[in-house]
Image: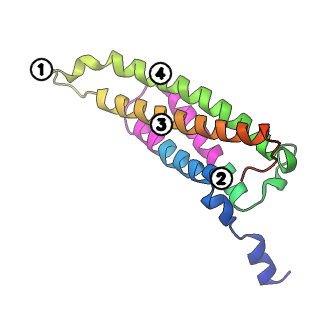
Amino acid sequence: MSAQATRSSLSANKTFLKSFPGVLRVLQLVMGAALWITIASSSYSGGIHFALFVAVFFWLLTLLLYFLTLLDKQDLVPLLGGQRWLLTNLVYDVLATILHVAATIVMANYTDQNSYCTLDEYQHRCPYNTYLTASIFASLCSLLYLLTTVCFCYKKCKGGQSVI
């Protein structure tokens, strides 16, 4: 195989880069990274482990889906690729939306539980701002996955087979 043939087989799908789902995937990656970095940078326990798991797990899967679609390699995914790629992305985004909403609820609950430490008299480390920031990022992730779900649902209902 020549070097030129190899290079062309790994070219980026510029249509996907400029498409609405492509832009949403990039935003999901940015917000997802912000979410798990915010959670991981603080001390966490209990239900926050769930929120961290959701953030990291879906960030990694979003990264994988993004690059598979960007490089037009979705046919390499057994059972889920090819003609089923749009449905695969739709189901993925529904699950991501639901679990990010759950992570938002967990982080909002911890934010509420730590609202006492914003008082001037409180002398110890206060995780309130970190939890509040994580709640906001989780909410934004939920919204972005919901938008992608609606976009893919619309395409699927119109009889589309492609993510783009």
Instruction: Answer with mark 2 or mark 3, whichever residue precedes in sequence.
Output: 2
Label 2: few (<14), some (14–19) or many (≥20) C-alpha neighbours in 10 Å: many
Which residue does the image show at 47% across and 36% down from the upper left? 140
**Residue 30 visible at all:** yes
Measured in 3D between alpha carbons, the distance from the residue under mark 1 to the one under mark 4, in whole angstroms, is: 27 Å
Instruction: Answer with mark 2 or mark 1, whichever residue precedes in sequence.
Output: 2
* Dot in front, 2 or 3: 3
Measured in 3D between alpha carbons, the distance from the residue under mark 4 to the one under mark 3, in whole angstroms, is: 15 Å
The residue identified by callout 1 is 121
* Dot in front, 2 or 1: 2
Which residue does the image show at 21% across and 25% down from the upper left? 124
Give whichever of 89, 64 is nearer the camera: 89
Secondary element under disc 3, as helix, strand or loop, is helix
Residue 64 relative to residue 126: left or right: right
* Dot in front, 4 or 2: 2
Part of the protein shown in magenta? 34-62
The residue identified by callout 3 is 140
* Dot in front, 1 or 4: 4
The residue identified by callout 2 is 66
Secondary element under disc 2, as helix, strand or loop, is helix
| Residue 120 at x, y percent in the picture | 12, 23
Instruction: Answer with mark 4 or mark 2, whichever residue precedes in sequence.
Output: 2
Instruction: Indicate whether 151 appears above or below 64.
Output: above
Instruction: Indicate whether 145 appears above or below 63.
Output: above
Q: Amino acid at mark 3?
A: Leu
The residue identified by callout 4 is 106
Q: Amino acid at mark 1?
A: Glu
| Residue 141 at x, y percent in the picture | 52, 37
* Dot in front, 1 or 3: 3
Q: Main secondary structure of the magenta part?
A: helix
Q: Residue furthest front?
A: 158
Q: Which mark is residue 35?
A: none
